[in-house]
Amino acid sequence: MELLIDDADLKVIEHIYEYYPVDGVTTNPSILAKAGRPPFVLLKEIRALIGEQAQLHVQAVAKDAAGMVEDAKRIVAELPGNTYVKIPCVPEGFKAMRQLKGLGIPTTGTAIYTPLQAFLAAKAGAAYTAPYINRIDNFGYDGIAVAETIQDIFEKNQLPAKILAASFKNSEQLLRLCRRGVGAATAAPAVIEGLVKNPAIDAAVDAFVEDFTQLTGQTAMSR
Ligand code: E4P
């Protein structure tokens, strides 16, 4: 499963990149608004930081297909590299995805709350589809079950699209999708760091160092 950072704070992205094996960055207009800087200036800095091979998913904001296609052209022109244009899975979005597929611009179907949105996005040519796990849970439905159904649909219909699961609140949600083998997940930095935040892990590591220090008086083998 590919793992991406759902954030636009440069310092935070730099920190996560230093310590964790991540595959790229996803943003949405709300995340960019939180950063409070001119979007393309910030996105270019993110692209420069993560390099051209890393995935960068950026959302189109126009509400009609023609506008989404124009947004997409600007996104890939200003942010060269492994860039995906996020397109909402609504009728205008499916229309835009089909046109963008024809133009060779890769897309990620977003704002997915139901499996059939992902099915239609995949048929319209989206490379990734993003079900919103936690937001679905908040409606009283089961976000993981929605993602698992999408995975079944893709496998049983031989659709080449991948899931890019989004909107997580905890490690357990990520674990279940990792175990199911979905293509990708994007999570907030706090959720990524929470994957290994466990006092038992820290205690085990500290105990090994203490035992070695008692034996040798050293805190590392080379010192
Ligand atoms: C991804 O495509 C979404 O933009 C995002 O991950 C939603 O996450 P949230 O529900 O935590 O805002």
Image (spheres, grey):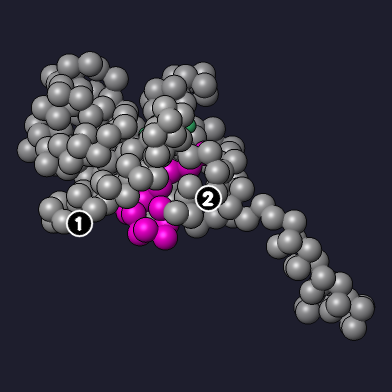
Q: Position of residue 140 (x, y in %)?
A: 43, 30
Q: Which residue is mark 2?
A: 172
Left/right of residue 16 with respect to residue 114 in the rendered view? right
Establish if 190 lies above or below 177.
above
173 or 197: nearer the viewer:
173
Residue in view at x 31 percent, y 32 percent: 113
Which amino acid is tagged 2? Glu
Residue in view at x 40 percent, y 39 percent: 142
| Residue 107 shows in the view | no
Earlier sequence position, callout 2 versus callout 1: 1
Residue in view at x 39 percent, y 34 percent: 141
Specify the segment rendered in magenta: 177-188
- Residue 210 picture quarter: bottom right
Residue in view at x 39 percent, y 23 percent: 29
**For the residue labelled by badge 1, is the local secondary structure a helix, a strand or a loop?**
helix
Quarter of the image where the C terminus is located: bottom right
Contact, CB < 8 Å: mark 2 with mark 1?
Answer: no
Q: Which residue is mark 1?
A: 155
Q: Position of residue 211 (x, y in %)?
A: 86, 77
Which amino acid is tagged 1? Glu
23 or 115: nearer the viewer:
115
Quarter of the image where the N terminus is located: bottom left
147 or 1: nearer the viewer:
147
Q: Position of residue 154 (x, y in %)?
A: 20, 51
Ligand 1 closer than 8 Å to the CB at disc 1? no
Report if residue 207 lies within the magenta region: no
Establish if 175 lies above or below 67.
below
Question: In the displayed image of the protein, which residue is found farthest to the front?
Answer: 140
Left/right of residue 34 with respect to residue 27 in the rendered view? right
**Distance from the alpha carbon under mark 2 to that under mark 1:** 23 Å
The local crowd at label 2, few if under 14, some if 14 to 19, many if 20 or more residues have their Cα within 10 Å, is few
